[in-house]
């Protein structure tokens, strides 16, 4: 934290503290191309998951195993994923995965519980390099299918 004193015509006006943010994370999924296993209807396209508007959602078809992945356009060192769920459609089993080619996936985090009452889930401290990041739903407590209001991926450009 740096402290700055502001002078105006030789008089101290105020003392200001400025905290510099670290260059840790940038949201890298915003409006990027996204692929989904299915959609419930044309009203709920996959692109809604990465538009930063939590009133628009991606809603999958009614099957327990569904995926949605975002193409980041280049390889990133991944640090965090945040998912905001559509109302009432919270999965109880899912994976966060990453890939360099959208064919071979590595699991960065797995969520498994008997009930999920969270509106938003954050997975920090992810380690891995990926061009693609995926939500892989593997189970819901109620009717099948998934709704994601926001799928945010954070990271930094990978060092070459």
Image (cartoon, helix red, strand yellow):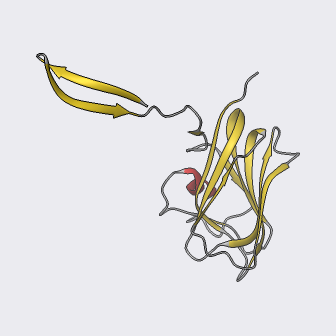
Is 31 above or below relative to 41?
above
- Toward the bottom, the furthest residue is 142
Residue 56: percent from the left, percent from the top?
51, 62
Q: Looking at the image, which is closer to me, 49 or 140?
A: 140
Residue 136: percent from the left, percent from the top?
77, 60
Query: Is 109 left or right of 87, judged from the image as shown?
Result: right
Query: Is 84 left or right of 4, judged from the image as shown?
Result: right
Q: Quadrant of residue 151?
A: bottom right
- Toward the right, the furthest residue is 104
Q: Quadrant of the C terminus?
A: top right
Please name the residue shown 85% across and 48% down the image. 106
Q: Looking at the image, which is closer to me, 111 or 64?
A: 111
Q: Quadrant of the N terminus?
A: top left
Please name the residue shown 13% across and 16% down the image. 10
Q: Looking at the image, which is closer to me, 57 or 133?
A: 133
Please name the residue shown 22% across and 24% down the image. 6
Is 1 above or below relative to 65?
above
């Amino acid at each position: 934290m740096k402290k700055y004193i502001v002078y105006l015509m030789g008089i101290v006006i105020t003392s200001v503290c400025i905290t510099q943010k670290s260059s840790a994370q940038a949201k890298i999924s915003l409006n990027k191309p996204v692929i989904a296993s299915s959609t419930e209807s044309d009203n709920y396209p996959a692109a809604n998951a990465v538009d930063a508007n939590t009133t628009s959602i991606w809603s999958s078809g009614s099957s327990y195993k569904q995926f949605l992945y975002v193409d980041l356009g280049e390889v990133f060192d991944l640090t965090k994923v945040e998912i905001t769920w559509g109302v009432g459609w919270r999965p109880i089993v899912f994976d966060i995965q990453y890939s360099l080619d959208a064919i071979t996936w590595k699991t960065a985090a797995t969520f498994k519980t008997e009930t999920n009452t969270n509106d938003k889930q954050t997975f920090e401290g992810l380690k891995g390099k990926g061009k693609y990041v995926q939500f892989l739903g593997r189970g819901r407590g109620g009717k099948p299918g998934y709704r994601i209001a926001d799928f945010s991926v954070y990271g930094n450009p990978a060092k070459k």
